[in-house]
Amino acid sequence: MKKNIHPNYVDTKVICACGNEFTVKSNKNELHVEVCDKCHPFYTGKQGVAAKTGRVEKFNRKYGINTEK
């Protein structure tokens, strides 16, 4: 690698809007993020299951598919 052209690679403190903090390597000292693995709906399991169910039911009603027998 060439000398004196690369940024410093330091431990970076990442702070999420939910209050979670963790460290990573970056060229910045501190990062602020809106979502992390502790508060993102996909990773926490709180993703809109009801919304998916509603979409399926809407599709079935639209095309006249009767799932109840």
Image (cartoon, rainbow, N blue to C red):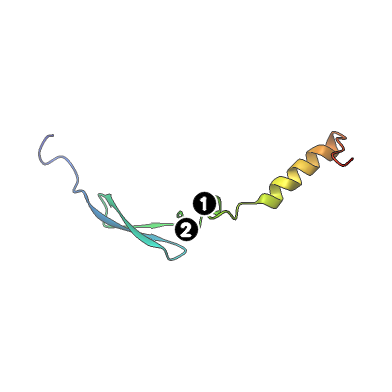
Q: Mark 2 points at which residue?
A: 38
Relative image position of residue 20 (x, y in whole percent): 41, 63
Describe residue 30's horizontal placement relative to residue 48 as left or right.
left
Q: Inspect the image, locate mark 1, and give the three-letter code of the amino acid beneath it.
A: Tyr
In this view, which residue lies farthest toward the left?
A: 3
Q: Which amino acid does label 2 sit on?
A: Lys
Local packing at callout 2 (Cα closer than 10 Å; few below 14, some 14-19, many 20+) is: some
Mark 2 touches mark 1? (CB < 8 Å): yes
Query: From this viewpoint, which residue is outermost toward the right?
Result: 69
Q: Which residue is more in the foreground, 32 or 54?
A: 54
Q: Is residue 41 left or right of residue 4?
A: right
Specify which label sits upstream in the sequence, 2 or 1. 2
- Left or right, 49 with reference to 26: right
Compared with 68, 43 (above or below) is: below
Question: Which residue has dot 1 on it?
Answer: 43
Residue 65: give x, y in percent of width and height.
Answer: 85, 35
- Measure the alpha-carbon separation of dots 2 and 1: 7 Å
Q: Quadrant of residue 56?
A: top right
- Residue at 51%, 54% in the rendered image: 40
Horizontal side, residue 15 vs residue 45: left or right: left
Task: Tell me what residue is drawn at x 45 percent, y 62 percent.
Answer: 17
Image quarter of the C terminus: top right
The kind of secondary structure element at disc 1 is helix
Q: Residue at x 27, y 49 (%)?
A: 26
Up-down: is 37 above or below 60? below
Q: Return the x and y of residue 3 as percentages of the image width and height.
A: 10, 39
Residue at x-position 79% and y-position 38%: 59
Classify 10 Å Cα crowding around label 1: few (below 14), some (14-19), many (20 and above): few
